Image: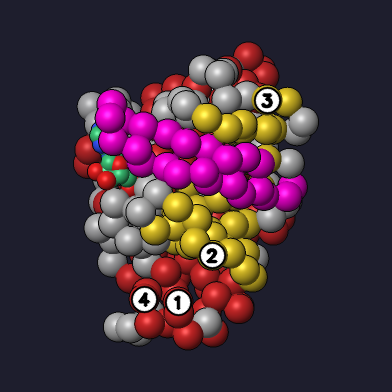
Amino acid sequence: MLSLENIDAYYMDFQALWDVSMYVEKGEMVAIIGSNGAGKSSLLKIISGFLKPTKGKVIFNGIEIQHAEPQDRVEMGISLIPEGRRLFSDMTVLENLELGAYTKKARKEKDITLEWVFQVFPRIKERINQTARTLSGGEQQMLAIARALMSRPKVLLVDEASLGLAPIIIQTIYKTIQEINRSLQMTIIIVEQNVRLALEVVNRGYIIENGRIVGTDTADALLNSEDVKKAYLALG
Ligand SMILES: Nc1ncnc2c1ncn2[C@@H]1O[C@H](COP(=O)(O)OP(=O)(O)O)[C@@H](O)[C@H]1O
Ligand SMILES: [Mg+2]
């Protein structure tokens, strides 16, 4: 459904991605794992259009989209939940959600989507009139996910949803993401520094180091791989 072919990408002179290839099938949930600075967020920016490759292709449902702008990719059904959530902190929860439904298709279906999002995140419904900044960290992450869902994505890209949250909240959030994947067959790519957590919720994973994909396998195989254990699961 979505694939990257031989992607190189730069920030000025600095090459952040080297010959990166990966794919995700419809309904799959895949993790990109790697340490801080490995290139995980850059890879999601390549898919969402915030970073343009100097080489390679991004193919979505058979169409090359590597030159398309981010807002056009949202129209096509690709939605990013950015690292650090990026909410409009002085706007209310409801206003943040409404901003998520800015595409043509999403605007038409806004009320139905809103009801669905409230079912997925009842805590968010209770807080619709509060400004985003008054929410707890976990609630802000839920709102960031809910806002992305408002665009009715076909592919959801989740960048470090666990960042700065307590373990119990992280579990709740990933369980919810997993339910969205299973109940709607929504394709989901998650990026995580917390490798064990990521591999416990996905079907497959890619390991990225210094801007290169160095391994890929099923989540179970990666969890049991000696290399992965040594490099990423040492503390667990
Ligand atoms: N806007 C930027 N300008 C320059 N370098 C950047 C920028 N964003 C990321 N980088 C560099 O690109 C590399 C990969 O970053 P990133 O994709 O954010 O890694 P990750 O998400 O895995 O922590 C890092 O070395 C980082 O310093
Ligand atoms: Mg990152």
Residue corresponding to mark 2: 215
Which numbered disc covers residue 155? Answer: none
User: Circle 1 sits in a helix, a strand or a loop, which is it?
Assistant: helix
Q: How far apart are marks 4 and 3 (CA)?
A: 35 Å
Kindly identify the residue that appears in the image at 57 percent across and 25 percent down.
Answer: 66
Which amino acid type is marked by label 4? Ala
Q: Position of residue 186 (x, y in %)?
A: 68, 47
Residue corresponding to mark 3: 64
Quadrant of the drawing holding the N terminus: top right
Q: Earlier in the sequence, mark 4 or mark 2?
A: 2
Which numbered disc covers residue 228? Answer: 1
Kindly identify the residue that appears in the image at 67 percent across and 49 percent down.
Answer: 24
C-beta proximity under 8 Å, tags 4 and 2: no
Kindly identify the residue that appears in the image at 77 percent across and 31 percent down.
Answer: 62
Q: Position of residue 206 (x, y in %)?
A: 54, 60
| Viewer-closest of 207 and 196 | 207
Q: How far apart are marks 4 and 2 (CA)?
A: 12 Å
Residue 54 located within the stretch drawn in magenta: no
> Which residue appears farthest toward the right when viewing the image?
62
Which amino acid type is marked by label 1? Val
Residue 138 visible in the displayed image: no
